[in-house]
Amino acid sequence: MHNTPDRPAVKQRRQALVVMAAFAATSWLPGAAIAQNYPTKPITIVVPFPAGGTTDILARIVGQYMSRDLNQAVVIDNRGGAGGNLGAQAVARAPADGYTLLMGTVGTHAINASLYKRMPFDHIKDFAPLSRVAMVPNMLVAHPSQPFNTVAEMIAYAKANPGQIRYASSGNGTSIHLSGELFKIMAKVDMQHVPYRGSAPAIADLLGGQTAIMFDNMPSAIQHVRAGTLKALAVTTAQRSPEMPDLPTIAEAGVPGYEATSWFGLLAPSGTPDAVIRRLNASIVKALNDPEVRQRIAELGATPTPETPESFASFIQQETTKWAEVVKASGASID
C-alpha cells in the first residue's frame, strides 16, 4: 500500500513553490524591485571638486530641495582631483541603484575626454544623464593690485610683459583653464597657467595676490566682485549677464568671436533602473522650476536648465564635439 503524503505538508510545498516562482519572476526585473519604494536611504551627490566652488554650490542648492522632495537626506561628498576625473570615476564604479550621483561638469563630461590621454571612465557609456542643472558664464576677474582695468588694457600689458600674467584655474582641462587657453590663442598673448585642485583654492590664492587673474565661474567669483576684493573685467559668454549688465563680454571688450560657457548637470551610474532615473529627473526638474531655487541660482549669475535625460544626453554629445576642437586648437594635453 502506498503512503499518502500528509495534506498540510503538500500544501506547504505548493506554497513554497509559488513563492519561489514569484521570486524567479521578479528577479528578472531588478529595476522594478529597486524603484518600487525608492528612495529608502540617503542619497549621495559626489562633487568632483573641493567645497566652495560653483559645482559644490549648485549641488547644495539642488540637493537641499531634492532632500525635501524625496524625503531622504542628500549628502554632498567632495572628491576633488584630476580635473574632476577622480570623483567622476568613483560614481562610474558605484552601484547603479540611484543612491550615488555625480554633479558633472563641462570638464568631466565634455572636455576631459579629448584632453586626457588616458581616461579612467567612459563619460558616455558609464553614466546615465538625469538633467542639466545650470548654464554658467565664466567671469574674467583680476586682483585689485593689477595695473589693468579692462580687457584691452590687460592685452596690452600681456604683450608688453610676455609670460608675466599668472592666471589661476580650478585644474588642468577644466572650462576655467580652457577659457584662458582660448583667450591666449585669440588675443595672441603669452600668459602663465597655474592650476589648482578646484575653484575655491584658486580663488583663495587670487585673493591673496599670488596670481593675477582668473576666468572663474561667475557663481564663485561674483561674491568677491560685489565685495570689492576682486575686480571684474568681462564675462566669457556671447551675451552680457543679467546679473551684471554693465560688464562687457570679452568679445565686446577686445577679442571678437570669443565665447566660452560652463555647465553643470546630475548623472547616475550607467545601468540605473529607468524608473529610478525618471524619479530623480522629476525631482531635479521640480527643484529647478521652484521659484526660490531659481532665484538663488540666478543670483549666482547662472541660468537654471531643467530638461529630460534624453535631452541632456544629446547635449553632452554636442559639447564633447565642440570642446574637442578647442582642445585641439589649444594644443593642451594631459598624460
Image (cartoon, grey):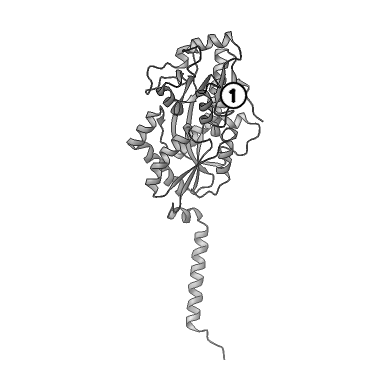
Residue indicated by mark 1: 194
Task: Label 1, secondary structure: give it.
Answer: strand
Identity of the residue furthest to the front in this view: 208
Residue at left offset 52%, top offset 59%: 27
Q: Position of residue 308 (x, y in %)?
A: 43, 38
Residue at left offset 49%, top offset 74%: 14
Circle 1 packing at 10 Å, graded few (<14), some (14-19), many (20+), is: some
Tell which of 61 and 166 is nearer to you. 166
Q: Position of residue 224 (x, y in %)?
A: 44, 25
Residue at left offset 43%, top offset 55%: 36
Count of labels shown?
A: 1
Tell me: residue 183, above or below residue 104.
above
Whether residue 164 can be seen here: yes
Identity of the residue furthest to the left in this view: 291
Identity of the residue furthest to the bottom in this view: 1
Whether residue 318 can be seen here: no
Q: Amino acid at mark 1?
A: Val
Q: Position of residue 215 (x, y in %)?
A: 51, 22
Tell me: residue 295, above or below residue 6.
above
**Side (left or right) of 243 relative to 221:** left
Tell which of 126 and 141 is nearer to you. 141
Which quadrant, please, contains the C terminus?
top right
**Side (left or right) of 112 relative to 260:** right
Tell me: residue 7, above or below residue 46.
below
Tell which of 151 and 309 is nearer to you. 151
Which quadrant, please, contains the N terminus?
bottom right
Q: Position of residue 24 (x, y in %)?
A: 52, 63
